[in-house]
Amino acid sequence: MEIRRRQPIGVELVRRGIVSESDINNALEYQRLNPSKKLGEILYIQNACDSQKLIENIGDILGAKGILLTRSSIKIKVTDYISLDIAKKNKAIPFEISQGKIKVCFATTINNKNIDAIRMLFLNRGLVMESYITFESDIDKILKSLEGNAINSFNNVVNNADSVTSLVDTIIKTGIDRRASDIHIEPLRDRVRVRYRIDGELFTTSDISKEKQSQIIGRLKAISNMHQEKQESQDGRILSYEDYNIRVSSQPNIYGEKFVLRLLKKNTNVRNIFELGFPYDENRFKKSINKKNSITVIAAPTGEGKTTTLYSIIDYLNRPEINITTIEDPVEIRIEGLNQIEVDNKSSFASSLRTVLRQDPDIILVGEIRDKETGEIAIQAGQTGHYVLTTIHTIDSIEVITRLRKMGISNYDISSTLATCISQRLVRRLCPECKRKRRFNEKEIELIDSIGRKYGIDFNTSGDTYDAIGCRYCNNTGYYERIGIFEVLDITNEIKEEIVNGQSSIEIRKKALQGGYKPLVVDGINKVIQGVTTLQELDNKLLIF
């Protein structure tokens, strides 16, 4: 199937008599408020015409077979042929198989690249794919249902697994399907607990019999290439799961050995910086990061998405005429066209950076400034014509200056080289399936107004806000996935002068606020007003109450 739109779908559907011009105008009005929705999907949501005729004609316009996919249409066990992770990524559901041919339904929003990837997946298994399309909302409903079934069956499989191999495999595959970033397998006094970190929060999913503890430990050590006999901290990797590089860490405790599995996806598509939640327009973003002879620092505590933001910036700057080299520990995402170096036991950020400077780089990404030596070399790189991107652990962008000072970097070097500090946090998004609309209450309005007065901003609280409710789709948390809140400190001449004069972070903050700097809470409040997250979630990160 090759999807090619010959002319706008709305025009063609009107021409065919499927919908009226009034229907299209209503759909376009809806689209202005919901820009992520496609026109065909909106017509389906608004029940503008017969759904079967609509999808068949959309399919014909796009050069595909259009069907209404329902649970009753699915004649096979989907997860026997495709993992939920791949199905969700590609909006693809196999629904019938016969004589070496497998029928796969895609969302109308899918592109040829995704379709070709799924076609190759099935070809490698000896199956010829026959492609169909349906509405994205129906694909999503079926995927959510499959995800719920997978979770419900997890405990049954864990408690009835006939071998430790299938038990460990189920734990890992369930983590992958549930979008977990980490899996915790923890020996307690009378049981082994399994927890998944999803969207930054830990959830307990199962308790395993204590009798299986030694077998689980042995299996994890075997597949992660650890020493079986050692009863001490170890690091390993599991490479046997398609599309995933799983880092494994073991740590003895009083009840045995705890394992944490970090699920790192191979070949992950780098997300656009604005999809991550960056609050400013492209022109301001370019001014902040498109520089030479300088350093840009991403600042945040551990686990707040610094590396993801770095990758997004690098991907934005990546062009064939620019030589970009990265020094990372480890390389989490491989990007075409970059020279990516992984720090190991025999090297460090500082030693690798010295070598990289002899490789004629234009832009250098240093995974983290951890010590004075790395900081000084990064500063020197910025002073000698390179653009350096790096991260540092601080609570906000102003404190980057204090942290560099404490490492022993001089005020002159900081002021002459530091160009931009970006600080961020990750907050959970409201679940789109169960969030409940309401008006802001008096206490919330008073809080938002007080923050607005403090920073000279007039927040509009006349609209609606939302409560996190909870449903099966979001594991009853009320939230699904995360988005960044950001602050940007551009090192202006006025701030450079404050740094050179040795002014404290308090004085630098005052000067920055006079120049238009807006702290993290401002972007957070804007995302609450936009209905993206809640004040409670913002309070979890920034303690605003």
Image (spheres, rainbow, N blue to C red):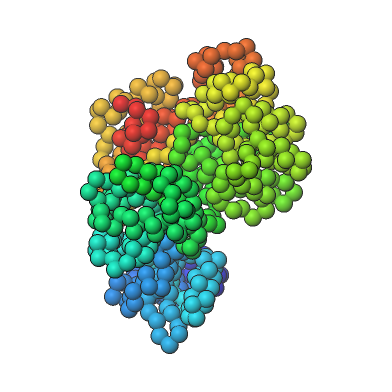
Q: Nearer the viewer, residue 191 or 98?
A: 191
Q: Position of residue 131 (x, y in %)?
A: 46, 76
Q: Is there any visible trace of residue 166 in the rendered image?
A: yes
Which image quadrant for residue 209? bottom left
At 71% from the left and 29% from the top, the residue drawn is 380
At 45% from the left and 85% from the top, the residue drawn is 100
Residue 135 versus residue 357 in the image, above or below: below
Looking at the image, residue 526 sits to the left or right of residue 1; the answer is left
Question: Which residue sits furthest bottom?
Answer: 99
Q: Position of residue 6 (x, y in %)?
A: 56, 70
Q: Position of residue 377 (x, y in %)?
A: 68, 31
Q: Nearer the viewer, residue 247 or 497?
A: 247
Residue 241 versus residue 448 in the image, above or below: below
Q: Is there any visible trace of residue 287 in the rendered image?
A: no
Report the number of discs. Answer: 0
Q: Nearer the viewer, residue 35 or 182?
A: 182
Q: Position of residue 260 (x, y in %)?
A: 40, 48
Question: Which residue sits furthest front?
Answer: 229
Looking at the image, residue 368 sits to the left or right of residue 520; the answer is right
Tell me the quarter of the image containing the C terminus. Answer: top left
Looking at the image, residue 443 sits to the left or right of residue 294; the answer is left
At 39% from the left and 54% from the top, the residue drawn is 179
At 64% from the left and 41% from the top, the residue drawn is 347
